[in-house]
Image: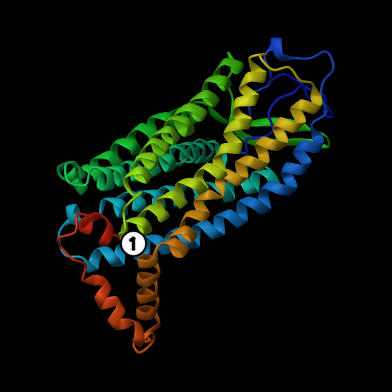
Amino acid sequence: MDEVTPTTYDYWDFGDYDNFTSPPDADRSRAVPCFLEDIYGFAARYSPAVFTLVFLLALVGNILVLCVIRRYRISQSGGACSFSLTDTFLLHLAISDLLLAFTLPLFAVQWSHEWVFGETTCKLSGALFTLNRYSGILFLACISFDRYLAIVHAVSSGWKRNTCHAQVACAVIWVGCLGLSSIDITFKQVDEVRIEGGKKMLCRLLFTENSTQWQVALQMISVILGFGVPLLIMLYCYIRIFKSLCNATRRQKRKSLRLIISLVSVFVICWAPYNCFQLVDSLHRLKLVSGGCQFGRVVDTGTLITESLGLSHCALNPLLYGFVGVKFRRELVRMCKGLLGQRGWLGMQGGSERRWRRTPSGSSESENTSYSVMV
C-alpha cells in the first residue's frame, strides 16, 4: 500500500463495512487530496451500534423461525419431500439471514477498535457475507416463482412443484453463491491503514493490480445479479399473480400473497438505496460521473448508511413472519405454551386451532399454502 499522509487521503471508499477498496489507481488520484477523517469518525460511531442491534434482533428472530419450522415439520406426517415448498425456501432464507448476522459483531469490533481476529477469520467472514447477501434474494426469487406456479398455473404445474425439486434448487443456489464468495477467500486481507492519530488493521478486499476494474466488476455483479435480475423475476411473477387474483375470493390465497409481497417489498426498500449508491460509485470510478471531495463524502456516507439499512433486512424478515403469517403466530404460541408448561393457557383457541388443521384436501393450494406454517 502506498504511503499517505496521516491526515489526508485520495478519494477511496470508506463505505463498505467489509469491503474497503484498495488505494486508487494512478489515473484516479487528484492533485489535491481529500480529507476523509470525518467519514471514518462517523463510521466508528455509527456502525458498531447499528451492527450490534441488527445482530441481536436477527439472532433472536431467526432462531425462533427455525424452531417454529422444525416444530411444525415434526408435527406433519411424511418424509422430507412432503414439506411445503414455501416453507422449504423460507427455511433456507432464515438460515441465510442468521449466517449473515453472525458476521456483524466482527465488523462492529473492527469499526470500534480494529480487526483483531486474524486473516483466516477475515476471509471467512467476508465469504459468509457475500454468500448470504446473494442467497437471500435468490431464495426470495424462488418463493416468488413458486407462488406464481401455484396460483397462475395451479393445475398444470403440480408435477413441477415437488418439494424434492425445491431442495435441489436450494442446493444449486448455495453452491452458486459459494462460487461468488470465492473472491473474498482469494482477495480479502488484513491490511494496515494510516489515519490521523495512528494506524488501524482493517479487513478489506485488496487488489494489487487493476483495482478500479475489479471494484467496478464486483459492484456491477452485485447490482445486476444480486438485485436487478432477481427483482425483475419477482415483479413479473407478482404482476401475473395480481392479474390471476383479480376475481379471486379465496382468503387463503390473499393471505399467502400478502406475506410473500411483504417479504419482497421490505427487501427492495432495504437494498435498493445501497445498490443505487453502488451504481453511482461505479460510474464515478469509470469517470462517467465527475465529482470532487464533497461528492466523494456524500457517496461514502450514503453507502455506509444504506448498507446498514440493507443489512437490517435479516432482522426484519422474522417480524414479517410474526405480523403477517397467521399460522406462524399460532405455531409460535403453541411452542411457547409447551415450553412454559401452561397446558391450560389459550384453551379457548384449541377448537379454532383444530379446525385450522382440517384444511380441505381437494383444494389446489392445500399442499403448498394451507399446510405452510408461514401463511
Residue at screen point 58% across, 47% down: 106
Residue placed farthest to the bottom in the image? Answer: 344
- Snapshot quadrant of residue 276: top right
- Judge the density around disc 1: few (<14), some (14-19), many (≥20) Cα neighbours within 10 Å: few
Residue at screen point 30% across, 79% down: 352
Q: Position of residue 84 (x, y in %)?
A: 25, 55
- Snapshot quadrant of residue 269: top right
The colour scheme applied to this rendered structure is rainbow
Q: Amino acid at mark 1?
A: Arg
Q: Is residue 130 above or below residue 314?
A: above
Name the one closer to the observer, 318 or 58: 318
Q: Position of residue 22 (x, y in %)?
A: 64, 23
Q: Is residue 353 left or right of residue 258?
A: left
Q: Position of residue 83 (x, y in %)?
A: 22, 56
- Snapshot quadrant of residue 233: top left
Name the one closer to the observer, 342 or 202: 342
Residue at screen point 49% across, 63% down: 60
Residue 138 visible within the image: no
Question: The C terminus is located in which quarter?
Answer: bottom left
Residue 183 visible within the image: yes
| Residue to which mark 1 is pinned | 251
Q: How many marks?
A: 1
Q: Is residue 251 left or right of residue 17?
A: left
Q: Position of residue 140 (x, y in %)?
A: 40, 44
Question: The N terminus is located in which quarter?
Answer: top right
Name the one closer to the observer, 159 or 87: 159
Q: Is residue 181 above or below residue 212?
A: below
